[in-house]
Image (cartoon, grey):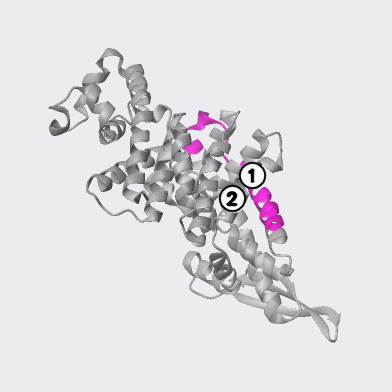
Amino acid sequence: MAISNHERVNRALILLRQGLHPYLEQEMRSAHNERWQTIAKSCLSDDQSSRRNLEDILREDISALLKIMIKQWDQVFRRRLSVSERALISELLEVRNKWAHQSRFSTDDTYRALDSIARLLKVISASEADVVEKQKQEVLGMLSPEKAEEARIKEKLAEIHKLLTFRDEKLLRRALTHRSYVHENPGEGEHNERLEFLGDALLNFLSGEYLYRRHPEKGEDELTRRRSALVDEKQLAKFAQEVDLNFKMRLGKGAIQDGGYYNPNLLSSTFEAVLGAYYLDNNSDIEAVRAIIEPLFDSVPEEIVISRSNVDSKNRFQEWVQRNVTQTPPKYLTVQTGGLSHAPEFVAKVLVGEKIYGEGKGRNKKDAEKAAAEDALAKLKKQGLM
């Protein structure tokens, strides 16, 4: 007889309860000693706790375990679990409530629920994780090819969290430290800008090599545009959030008040710094960094890269100028500098007011001006201005 998706989720929730129960008791007892049961019971609603003793509740009710973990997050569980695991706990409480209300689970919903359960069980080293993982793989085979590929990418991203660990915690601490934090806390040592420089260099090389291997039919211009799209500020900021760097950034109070935890420039810069630090922490082994970054590159849909790479660099630069400097559009000065009569060469400079922002070459004025705009955008990015 075929198993319904609702029943698949039920079986996985039972395994989650079996794995979480001893873990929760151990952590609560460690933090609160003999008072742990009283504190745990206070986290539950009167309806949930009045009819049974706590041991029966924890052995039978997964929602009680999850609620206690949420209520005791700051006091107990954040010591060993990350922000992403806190989000998993809330997500699984919603899954349990959906199951309890007999809501319909699509195959896609079922896969996501089993994936989240398996991930949390793996984090706490529960043996039940292996059983849920097998159930998850069965559901993966039921998904459409597109959904299955999307699910595999998400699994790769989850693996990054396991890889991105540091032997030298001071190095990671420096990578997460913004200039604003050091300014307000002078005794905190070096900020992350040197590591950001190193990470930027690594990203440029690894993204270029990645695209070179992936698109053997593409020429230099197309590869350059795609590289710019793959490692632009918005995309790097998204990568930073996917590996949970946002709330780990060490920012000054002013930067926090200005929304620094959500600032794409700060997120992308911190991501570059962490990659630079990870490279050094792994004895300057670029393969270690490649293992982190390539699954992230794989996660970016091809159509997004194409769409971004097709945005004209002159328009992008003009948008930046009008947003940050002046409403007057940039000026381009272009001259022919040589080449053959049938293949001339042009050099262009792009100016804002009297200041030169970039230079570029091309076989016609249009290409030279485009190259100048791309040069200007690259310089702005290195300066942390976009």
**Secondary structure, magenta segment, majority class:** helix
Q: Is 185 in front, or is 103?
A: 103
Nearer to me, 323 or 280: 280
The residue that appears at 43% across and 34% down in the rendered structure is 121
Locate residue 138 relative to residue 274 in the image: left or right: left
Kind of residue at badge 1: Ala
* Relative to 225, 123 lies left or right: left
- The answer to whether residue 351 is above or below residue 135 is below
Q: Name the residue beneath numbered marker 1.
A: 291
Say above or below: 287 vs 39.
below
The reply to whether residue 112 is visible in this rendering is yes
Q: Are marks 2 and 1 in contact (CB under 8 Å)?
A: yes
State the residue in front, 70 or 274.
70
Q: Is residue 154 above or below residue 70?
A: below
Bounds of the magenta segment: 181-210
Residue 99 screen position, x and y as percent: 27, 46
Residue 259 visible in rendering: no
Residue on which disc 2 sits: 295
Q: Quadrant of the C terminus?
A: bottom right
What secondary structure is found at the residue carrying circle 2?
A: helix
Residue 21 % position (x, y): 33, 26
Q: Position of residue 70 (x, y in %)?
A: 30, 34
Q: Tell whether position 54 is magenta.
A: no
Residue 162: x, y in percent?
Answer: 54, 37
The residue nearer to you, when weighing 249 against 54, is 54
Secondary element type, mark 1:
helix
Whether residue 183 appears in magenta in the rendering, the answer is yes
Q: Residues within 10 Å of mark 1 (few under 14, many from 20)?
A: some
